[in-house]
Image (tube, helix red, strand yellow):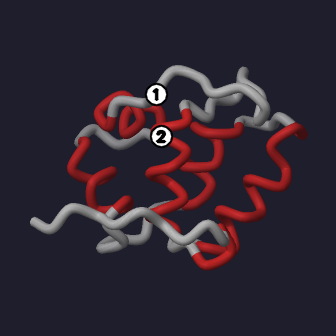
Amino acid sequence: MAKPTKPDADRTRWSFGTLLRWHLQHGTRPDGHPDRPGIKWKQKDFAGSCGYGADSNVRRWINDSDKPNFERIAAALFGTSDVYREWRNELFRAW
């Protein structure tokens, strides 16, 4: 498998999978804040937080080979926190 290239600096051009990968690496979590990175997500933990048992689901999402349920993804990353409104909208547009 080819190593992914560094995404373009213009996040509006990022795919859903690229954005999701960034959020997992950044540690985006409902109790966090956009100004501070959180604890990186492990794929298995993120899959569980979304209500899926297998980390293979997450791999398909970040590789843009499967389209997940957006609300489950958004709940695991952002919860209901208003501080993430822009990031949630950005991810939804890419979805």
Give the residue at mark 2.
24
Residue type at the position of mark 2: Leu
Side of 64 relative to 60 (left or right): right
Residue at 29%, 64% (x, y): give it: 4
Mark earlier in primary sequence (1, 2)? 2
How many numbered marks appear? 2
Q: Quadrant of residue 10?
A: bottom right
Taking depth in this image into account, of 26 and 32 the one nearest to the observer is 26
Q: Which mark is residue 40?
A: 1
Separation of residues labelled 1 and 2 (CA atoms): 6 Å
Secondary element type, mark 1: loop
Give the percent coordinates (x, y) of residue 35. Answer: 78, 31
The quarter in which the N terminus is drawn is: bottom left
**Badge 1: residue crowd in 10 Å (few <14, some 14–19, many ≥20):** some
Residue at 25%, 42% (x, y): give it: 55
Give the percent coordinates (x, y) of residue 85. Answer: 85, 50
Q: Is 16 drawn above or below residue 79 in the view shown? A: below
CB atoms of marks 1 and 2 within 8 Å: yes
**Badge 2: residue crowd in 10 Å (few <14, some 14–19, many ≥20):** many
Residue at 28%, 62% (x, y): give it: 60
Residue type at the position of mark 1: Lys
